[in-house]
Image (spheres, rainbow, N blue to C red):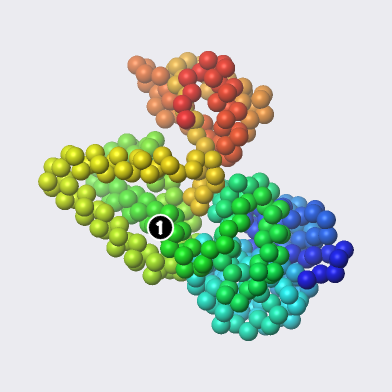
Amino acid sequence: MNSEGSIRKIAIFGVGLIGGSLALCFKGKPGITVVGYAHEPELKERYVQSGVLDQATLSIEEAALDADFIFLSVPVGMLNHYLQVLNKLPLKKGCIITDVGSTKASITAAAETLDFRDVHFIGGHPMAGSERSGVEAASPLLFENAYYVLTPQSNVSDEVFEKLKNLLSYTRAQVIRVEPEHHDDIVGAISHLPHIIAVALVNQISSYNRTEPLYQLLAAGGFRDITRIASSDPVVWRDILLSNREVLLRLLSDWNEQVQQFTQVLEKRDGEAIETAFREAGSFRDQLPERRKGVINALFDIYIDVPDTPGIIGRIATELGTARINLSNMQIIESREDVPGILRLSFRQEEEMERAIELLTNLEYTVRS
C-alpha cells in the first residue's frame, strides 16, 4: 500500500469513546499520522484539547484525502450516509474503510452496492466499551484483552485483510474473522436481546410504580445492577435494533417460548423443572470467561460491610486515594442501626478493583465481590 518509510494516514470519523480510543492506540506509532473529522467547530476544539489526534479538520474531503485507513466510528444509523459520501471522493488507491458498529450484515450489504474502485470495505466491531462516553473517556487500553471482530466482504483479499489486522495489533485486542450474518446472530443474542429485555423489565416495574411507589424504593441494589443496560443511549439503540431487526424478531420469538415454558412450569407447580432450569443456567454461566472484555461492559464492583460510625466512608476513600487506586463510584446500599452498612465501590478497571480488594482486606475490612 505504501512505499517503505512513507507515512500511513489514518482518518477517524467520529472521535468519541471508540474512535478516540482507536486514535490513541495508533497515535505516536512510527510512520502513522492520525487525523480526525469533526462535523462541528466545538467538536474540533474538544478533539484538539483532548490530545488524541495529530490533526483535526472540519472537512470530510481533507480527512479522507490520501488516507490509507478510514475508521467510521459513527452511529449505526449514519454509516450508510458516510459510505455514500466517501464513495464520491477520490480516495487513495488501496484505502481500507472499516466501521465499528455492532451490526454488520446491513452495512456490508450497503458497501457491496457502492462502486468503490481500488478501495476496500471491511466491517469491524470492537467488542469493548465503557460506562462513560465522549472523547474525554477515550483510553488506549479500552480494547486490550477484548475481541475485535472483522467481517470482510467476499471480494476482500487475504492480503488486504491482513493489512487491517496488522494495524489493529496496536489495540492489543484479539482479532477474529466472522461472516457478517453470523456476527449479527450472535451479538443479537448476547447483547441486543438482553438490552430489549432489560428495557421491557424496567418499564414493567415503572408501570407498577405509578400506583405503588414502593417498587422504586425497593428496586435498589441487585435490580438496578441487572437492568443497568436499560439506561443505554436511546437513539444509538434505536438504530442498532432496527438495523438487526430480522434477527431480533426471531430471537424474541425464541425468548417468548422460554417465558411460556416458565409460565407452564409455574402453572404446574413443577419445582423439579425450576431447579433444572436454574441448574442448567448456572452451569453454562459458570463456564463463561470472566477475565475477557465482552460486548456488554463488565461491572467491577466490591461490597464492604461498614459499621455506622462517623468518618468511616471518608477513611476508606482516603486509603484508596493514598494508594492511587482510581474509584469511579461509591454508594451506601443499606445503613441501619441494627445491621452494618453496605458500601459498594465501583471501578473502571479490573486491575484497580483487585488492588482495592487486597488493600482493604489487609486493613481488615470484610470485602465481597
For numbered disc 1, what is the local secondary structure?
Answer: helix
Q: State the image coordinates of residue 324 (x, y, percent, origin top left).
A: 67, 29
Report whether 53 appears left or right of 239: right
Label 1 packing within 10 angstroms: few (<14), some (14-19), many (20+):
some
Position of 194 with respect to 146 (left or right) is left
Which of 94/9 is in front? 94
Tell me if I can see residue 205 in this picture. Answer: yes
Q: Residue at x 56, y 21 (%)?
A: 360
323, 185: nearer the viewer:
185
Q: Quadrant of residue 88?
A: bottom right
Q: Is residue 213 visible?
A: no
Residue 347: percent from left, percent from top: 56, 36
Residue 93 against residue 23 in the figure, above or below: below
Across and down, in percent, residue 38 comes to: 69, 65
| Image point (58%, 40%), residue name | 348
Does 309 sit above or below residue 208? above
Residue at label 1? Answer: 189
Which of these two is toward me, 44 or 128?
A: 128
Q: Amino acid at mark 1?
A: Ala
For the N terminus, the image quarter is: bottom right
Q: Residue furthest front?
A: 158
Name the residue at 36% across, 40% down: 283
Seen in the picture, residue 247 relative to 47 is either above or below; the reply is: below
Q: Identify the residue at the far right of this view.
A: 5
**How many discs appear?**
1
| Residue 216 drawn at (x, y percent) | 33, 41
The residue drawn where x is 74% and y is 81% is 90
